[in-house]
Image (spheres, rainbow, N blue to C red):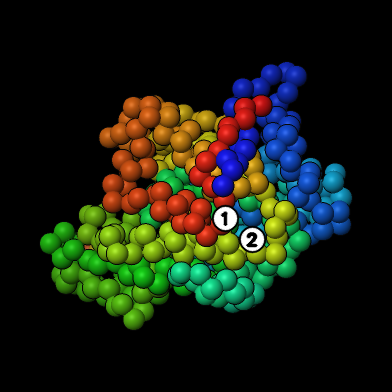
Amino acid sequence: MQASTVYFCDLRTSVKENLPAKLERLMTTAGFDEVVPERGLVAIKLHFGERGNTAFVRPVLVRRIADRIKALGGRPFLTDSNTLYAGTRGNSVSHLETAIENGFAYSVTRVPLIIADGLRGASFTRVRIDRETIQTAYVGREIAEADALVSVAHFKGHELAGFGGALKNVGMGCASRKGKLAQHSDLSPKVKKKKCKACGACAAHCAQSAILQEGDEKARILAERCVGCGECILICPNGAIDVQWDADVPRFQKKMAEYTLAVLKGKEGRSFFLNFLTAISPACDCYGHADAPIVPDVGVLAGRDPVAVDQASADLVNGQPATEGSALTKGKGPGEDKFRALYPRVDWTVQLAHGEKIGLGTRRYELVRI
Ligand code: SF4
Ligand code: SF4
């Protein structure tokens, strides 16, 4: 397969060109205008950030993306699907409230918000792909019905995928609740009894009531109720909850790549990927906080190939020196693998290798700096 072109802009600006203008120049140079159908409904898929999180992509930059779509005759809307876990984005009502509180109000972005999978996450379109781990995918209906898709991903670390970029934003982020469940279903974690201090934090947090913990008894996970959302792993203050890394995580990443394929099915030539390498936190924006960035801000990447955009993003982040005082205590030098240092048992390359194998794109890229 031929190398894909990935376009990159750093964050230098001047009186002649501010960041929104530079972002627009990046997009147009990367062929953005070709993917927007006139009068087409264009889903801008992003993460609005959990309440309390501060690392998501800034609304004023998203406005510029929407403005470009409108200038081309398209009809953009901002979208995400509801989450599996307890939080402020588990149904469309609280999801929209959180998005607006985080700055994605119409008055800021001048574009409507539509949650992709209905009031309680039950609205989906079946997409048949017949791949290794997924036969039929359950994609949020409003995204499936859109004419084009623009992925706006905040690039950061992720405890199960190593990093979260375009594949995670599209594959997991566009899936309905049923689709998310299918991707997480092999990921039921385990409690390490020796480490558990019976504090009860995990049981109080689990939205599925899948953890039993009473009095001095150690926590216990009920496999029949657990949906594998992984939330309890980071909630436990004592590191007593862990997934079965070797068996489950590669399969999780393969499912995510195959879901990306399903979401993009029917949108060939009408999808575009922007990765923002800014405020690169160690964990997902699904948490109600954003830890200090692990490396300095890098810039924005754009392209038509999600695998190449993610590969280039990971390479650029790994090429940076670690930020002093961040969560990164190992792998701090330029060129060292920051994601492997954060999550030593997660091989983040699985999602990219599998994406390449199933024809989503290529890991080989040419980086064009604008
Ligand atoms: S036990 Fe953990 S992984 Fe399972 S549903 Fe509850 S919070 Fe999610
Ligand atoms: S949060 Fe951790 S320490 Fe507390 S009960 Fe759950 S597993 Fe045990």
Q: Which residue occupies the foreground of this view, 9 or 18?
A: 9
Q: Residue at x 49, y 61 (%)?
A: 256
SS for tag 2? helix
> Which of the two marks, 2 or 1, is nearer to us in this view?
1
Residue positioned most to the front? 1
Residue under label 1: 360
Under mark 1, the amino acid is Leu
State yes or no: discs 2 and 1 in contact (Cβ < 8 Å): yes
Q: Residue at x 41, y 49 (%)?
A: 349
Q: Residue at x 16, y 72 (%)?
A: 217
Q: In the drawing, what numbered circle is on residue 195?
A: none
Q: Tag 1 or tag 2, which sits nearer the N-term?
A: 2
Ligand 2 shows up in the quarter that is bottom left
Residues at marks 2 and 1, CA–CA distance in whole angstroms = 9 Å
Question: x, y percentage for residue 364?
Answer: 52, 41
- Looking at the image, residue 214 lies above or below residue 353: below
On the image, which quarter does residue 249 sit in?
bottom left
Q: Around disc 1, counting alpha carbons within 10 Å, would you say few (fewer than 14), some (14 to 19), or many (20 or more)? A: many
Q: Residue at x 31, y 77 (%)?
A: 223
Q: Which residue occupies the foreground of this view, 171 or 56?
A: 171
Question: x, y percentage for residue 157?
Answer: 42, 45
Q: In the drawing, what numbered circle is on residue 264?
A: 2
Q: Which residue occupies the foreground of this view, 336 or 55?
A: 336
SS for tag 1? loop
Q: Is residue 250 visible?
A: yes
Under mark 2, the amino acid is Leu
Does the Cβ of the disc 2 residue fall within 8 Å of ligand 1?
no
Q: Which residue occupies the foreground of this view, 241 or 25?
A: 25
Question: x, y percentage for residue 186?
Answer: 36, 70
Question: x, y percentage for residue 259?
Answer: 54, 64
On the image, which quarter does residue 232 sit in?
bottom left
